[in-house]
Image (cartoon, rainbow, N blue to C red):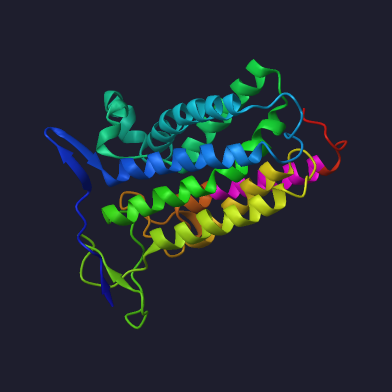
Amino acid sequence: MLIHPLIDPVALQIGPVAVRWYGLTYLVAFGLFMALGARRLRHAPYAHSGRWTFQDVEDILFLGVLGVVLGGRLGYCLFYNPAYYAAHPLEILYAWRGGMSFHGGMLGVIAAMAWFAYDRQRGFWEVADFVAPCVPTGLASGRIGNFINGELWGRVADPSLPWGMVFRGAGDAPRHPSQIYQFLLEGLLLFAILWLYARTGPRTGRVAALFLAGYGVLRFVVEFFREPDAHLGLLQMGLSMGQWLCVPMVALGLALWLWAGRKAPGDGA
């Protein structure tokens, strides 16, 4: 079995200013979004439309960052510890103590895309289809940050598992490095699927639908190897909170896929 490497969470210290690896993974995520967004402008229906420019990529990123931060924090407080934060509402603002939810962040990004679509007079699903393939690499980058920090580790693994890993603070038993599983599945695999599919010029809404259903399924599977939140444990039917939050994602993705199939090609409403 392996021992999680002791990595200093601070990548660079300049006087009182500390640059953390986790913060750098966010910068990498933003840079990847910009690069992929620029490539996305060459895909149908965005290429040569005369309506999409690199300025749109920058504006979507700015709004998306706000959505991720605000939605992720509020989602964590609401989904994972509502009673505590109802009793200590000011601590909702203490984001530096940790506590972010992907599903909350996704809702924040949806709100940001809706605002962008309204402000620029674009179809919402046209915007969502543009954004969806550019997201998984950012998720992958974040999971590397989780691994560096030695957080969000997996469940106890069979001692014979070659890549079973002992994480500091999690006892002496080897565990699944679930951060790496998420990096590979929700990050790289989902990106490859979405990017290749988006280039086929599918009906409007189906790229976003594939993201919802694909992420939901992959996250649901990985959660079987990830340690559930200590204060929640496993919930009904032996599923984690993360898995229960994935159920409506998959259902919505499948419903959107069917609905988009009934629309006229190119309808971005």
Main secondary structure type of the part rendered in magenta: helix
Asked whether residue 180 is in view, the answer is: yes
The verdict on residue 15 being magenta is: no
Asked whether residue 238 is in view, the answer is: no
Q: Front-most of 38 and 156?
A: 38
| Badge count | 0
Residue at x-position 41% and y-position 43%: 28
Q: Residue furthest left?
A: 15
Q: Front-most of 93 and 133?
A: 133
The answer to whether residue 234 is above or below residue 93 is below
Q: Front-most of 214 and 204?
A: 204
Percent position (x, y) of residue 11?
23, 47
Left or right of 259 on screen, residue 192: left
Q: In which quarter of the image is the C terminus?
A: top right
Left or right of 67 on screen, residue 97: left
Instruction: State the extent of the magenta-drawn residues as a range.
Output: 246-260
The answer to whether residue 182 is above or below residue 68 is below
Left or right of 250 on screen, residue 263: right
Q: Which residue lies furthest to the bottom in this view?
A: 160
Residue at x-position 25% and y-position 65%: 4
Percent position (x, y) of residue 45?
76, 36
Residue at x-position 72% and y-position 48%: 199
Percent position (x, y) of residue 44?
76, 39
Percent position (x, y) of residue 195?
64, 50
Quarter of the image holding residue 82?
top left
Residue at x-position 58% and y-position 31%: 110
Q: In which quarter of the image is the N terminus?
A: bottom left
The verdict on residue 252 being magenta is: yes
